[in-house]
Image: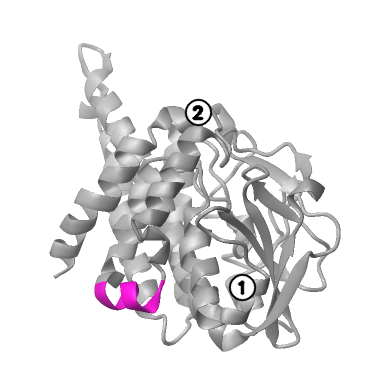
Amino acid sequence: MHSEIRTLLSSTFGRLLEDRHPAAHARRALPAHDDVQRALWKELAEGGWLEAGSEAFQAEYGPGTLPMGEWAGRALLTLPYGASAFLARVLLEQAPALSEVLLDLAAHPASIRCDRAEDEAGWIDDYGPSAQYLRLSRRDGGWVLARHDPAMLDPAQGLDPTVALARLRGPALAQAALPGEQVLPALQTHLAFLLAQLAGAAGASLDLAIAYAKEREQFGRAIGQFQAIKHPLVDAWIGLDNGRYAVEALLRSRAALDPALAALATLQNTSLTVQNSASLSRPALTGWTASPNSSTLLVANTGAFSAPNLASLTTVVLQVRSGAHLTLPGVTAYTWNQLANPT
């Protein structure tokens, strides 16, 4: 059944992204209101792909969430598809009253930041004036979804050259309260999709690395024949496969939220993506670190492959071991567990 779903989605969703979002779009950092981006978003909306997070779609094609995320990562997708389809649309389905907060997603892609209500407004991915900007905040055992004015965004210099970064400013234009039992399952599926997108970015970088290892020669033979090259590539391939299993387990656990499982999936996919990207010496990764021996793992935008900015979801630092935090400007540190169970 899983293979049938993968084949079906590959010939539809995967082919759509492959045809309509080449890597050149990511390199040009096109905003959501650019004509080619609008055309792609229209196709996603009219094709029903914004309903991918719905209960009906998940019941029939739920195992396809992982390959859909991977195709989005391989396409270097620079539109907030995951936030729109797997979080905003799902919350609207569960709470129709949110129609007073959310604009039409078919016309206004949703960029979403998750944090806690007592925090000052922070960073969010900036897709231009046609997008809508939402803040999902934990408050008093529940959640509040607020929409902010795009004109009030304060642009900032980010690490990702393909998606702009901005700080939320000003009061909310509209907001509504939501119970935790509605938000957390949607948030976990959204996290799974974003981690699958990271796995897709990691897979793309690994493919490039393998191709380069076969092509580049040193001492009269391809460098991929040397153990110092092929062993790390094998390790990366195994790590990528383990990352997929972790995301699949995270998707299966929607009925029973598991912070430890979310942390494992994040660890597997993010560390692999950052390490693979860094191995290609992409300049956009300057200042990033990801070490198995470090006290924290950076969970956010890899820059080189336009993976989604997880600051918009759980924010940026996952505690792996006790010790000092790894910090970057504009980054607030939370874990999934802190969002699910605030003190």
Q: Which residue is drawn at 39% across and 81% down?
A: 253
The kind of residue tagged 2 is Arg
Q: Does the magenta stretch include residue 59?
A: yes
Name which residue lies at 43% across and 48% down.
42
Residue 267 visible in the shown view:
no
Q: Is mark 1 on a helix, strand or loop?
A: helix
Q: What residue sits right under mark 2 in the picture?
A: 27
The magenta span reads 54-60
In this picture, residue 175 sits left or right of residue 293: right
Q: Which amino acid does label 1 sit on?
A: Ser
Q: Which of marks 1 and 2 is in front?
A: 1
Q: In which quarter of the image is residue 74?
A: top left
- Name the quarter where the C terminus is drawn: bottom right
Give the main secondary structure of the magenta stretch.
helix
Judge by depth and name the residue closer to the eye, 262 or 217. 262
Relative placement, left or right, of 162 versus 250 is right
Q: Position of residue 128 (x, y in %)?
A: 65, 42
10 in relation to 252, above or below: above
Residue 294 coordinates in the image, percent (x, y): 59, 55
**Residue drawn at 78 percent across, 64 percent down:** 173
Of callouts 1 and 2, the N-terminal one: 2
Do tag 1 and tag 2 residues touch (Cβ < 8 Å)? no
For the residue labelled by badge 2, is the local secondary structure a helix, a strand or a loop?
helix
State the quadrant of the N terminus.
bottom left
Q: Residue 165 in the image: state x and y as whole percent.
A: 68, 43
